[in-house]
Image (cartoon, grey):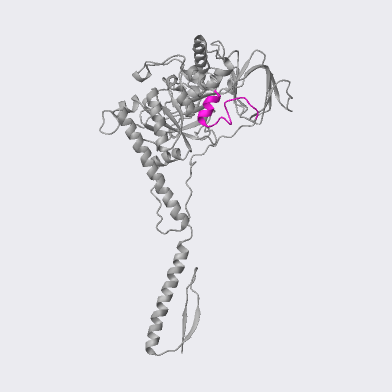
Amino acid sequence: MHWLIAGVAVGGPVVIFMQVPGDNVTDRALSRLLAGVMIIATLVACSAEESRPLEVAPLNKDPFPSTYRIPASNPLHIRRVTLLTGSGERLDDAEVVVAQGKFLAVGSELDTPDGAVVLDAKGNWITPGLIDVHSHMGVYSAPRTANHADGNEMTNPVTAQVWAEHSIWPQDPQWEKAIAGGVTTVQILPGSGNLIGGRGVTVKNVPSTTVQGMKFPGAPYSLKMACGENPKRVYGGRTQLPSTRMGNMAAFRQAWSDAQDYQRQWQIYRSKAASGDPSAKEPKRDLKLETLVAVLEGEIRIHNHCYRADEMVQMIDMSKEFGYRIAAFHHAIEAYKVAPILRENAVCAVMWSDWWGFKQEAFDMVRENIALVDLVGACAIIHSDDAIQIQRLNQEVAKAMSAANRMGLAVDRARAIKWLTLNPAISLGLDDQIGSIEEGKNADFVLWSGDPFSVYSRAEKVWIDGALRYDISDPSVRPTSDFNLGLFESPEIQP
C-alpha cells in the first residue's frame, strides 16, 4: 500500500492522503503523477500570486510646489469709497471689510472687526487687483540683454516639456513696476516662436527669492500654443515642419496624435497592473507627451496665440478632433469676426486696445474689437504682452471703453473693468478665488487716487490676500529687487 500526497488550491498546495495498492511499476507511476501534481500546484499558486494588483507609483504632478503663504495682517475696514466690484456692479459711498486675507463683507454701514485698521477713502476708488494673462516678465527680464532672453526654446516646433517657471528670474525689476500699476496676478508664458512653446504659470506679484514663493497655490498650469506667422517664420528655413500654415496644422495634429498614443500606452499599463498581469511594463516617461496628455485629461489649460479669425476656428475644430478645450486665444486681432463662435465654444479672446499693423496677420484690427466680443456675451480680456504696457492696463481699458462708446455701445466702467479682472480670472480657472470683490474671495484689490479710467489717477495702495504690498507714500512697503540694491544712492529713489 502507498500513500499519495498531492493537491492544489488557490493560494498554495493542499495535502491530500490517499491509500493505493503498490508495486515497483506503480511506485514509479505514482512518483511521476505526484511530481506533475506538485508542479501544477506550484504554477497555480504562482499564478494566484501574480494576479494580485501590481503597485504603480503615482506620478508627481506638482514637483515644484508653491511655497507662498498668506502673510498675517490686521483686519481692514475701508469706508466712503467708490467701488467697482469686477462682477458688473458699481457701488457709491461703499464700504469693504477684509479679514484673514479674504473679503469679509461688502456694502454699507458694516461692522468694524476688533483690531481693524479703519481707512476713510472718500474720493478714492477701489477695483479688484488687475490680472494680466499674457506677460513675459521674469523670462525676458530687465535689463533686456541676451543672457536674459529665456522665453523661447526654439530648438523644436513642439517643446511642451519646457516650463516657463524654470526661466523666471524673481529679481526682475519689472515686477515692482507692474504692482505700481495695480497688477496683482500675472500669467507668465513662454514665447511664441514654437507651435507649442511649453507650460505657462500663474504667479502672485509678490517679492520672493524663489519662483515657488510667487506661484499661485493650486492654480492650473497653461500650455502656450501659437498658430500663424511666428512658428512658420522661425522654422521656414529648416528641413522640418512647419514652413507654411498647412505645415503648422499638420505638426499640431501629429503632436496630439502622439499624445493620444502615449495616453493609451499608460492606460493599458495601468489596466494590466491593476489586474496583476505579469506582462505589464511601465512605458518610458516622455516629458513632452506627458504635458500634452495632461491637456487631453483636462488638467492643463490651452492659451493659444492666434490673430486671424479663420485660424481660430480651425484651432477650435482641431481641439474637438482630439478632445481638449481651449481656454483663450491671445492677440486675437480678428476676434470680432468670430465672436459668436467664441461664445458658443466658451473660449475667451485676449486682446489689445489698439495695437495693430506690425505684421500682416495683425493688420485687420478695429478699436472696437474688445467691446464687440463683449457685446455678444463672449469672454473679452485685455492684456499687455509688454513690460511697459503692463504698468498702465487701466488706461488700456479706458481706451477700449472709449472706442465702444463712440460706436454707441454704452459700455460703463462697471462693465469694462471685467475685461481686466473677472474675465482674466475665468480664463485662468481662478474665478472662484480672484477677479471680483465678493465675500469669501481673496482680498486682492487696488485703491486708486480717483477714477481708475482717468490718465490722472494712480494706484495709491495695493493689497494681495489682504496684505498691503504697495503704498505710493511709503517706500518701506514698496521694496525694490535685489538687482537694484546698490544702484541707487537712497532707498527713497526707486527705479
Residue 424 located within the stretch drawn in magenta: yes
Left or right: 51 as drawn, with respect to 113: left
**Residue 330 drawn at (x, y percent):** 43, 25
Q: How many marks?
A: 0
Residue 31 located within the stretch drawn in magenta: no
Query: In terms of depth relative to the viewer, which is nearer, 122 or 56?
Result: 56
Give the residue displayed 47% in from the left and 14% down from the top: 368
Q: Main secondary structure of the magenta part?
A: loop
Q: Is residue 70 above or below residue 405?
A: below
**Residue 185 drawn at (x, y percent):** 53, 27
**Residue 176 drawn at (x, y percent):** 52, 23
Left or right: 247 as drawn, with respect to 327: left
Query: In terms of depth relative to the viewer, which is nearer, 58 or 495?
Result: 58
**Residue 38 drawn at (x, y percent):** 43, 75
Give the residue displayed 38% in from the left and 83% down from the top: 29
Magenta residue span = 421-439
Give the residue displayed 34% in from the left and 25% down from the top: 230
Query: In terms of depth relative to the viewer, which is nearer, 494 or 37?
Result: 37
In this orientation, does residue 181 appear?
A: yes
Question: Would you identify the image quadrant in which residue 322 lies?
Answer: top left
Left or right: 17 as drawn, with respect to 227: right
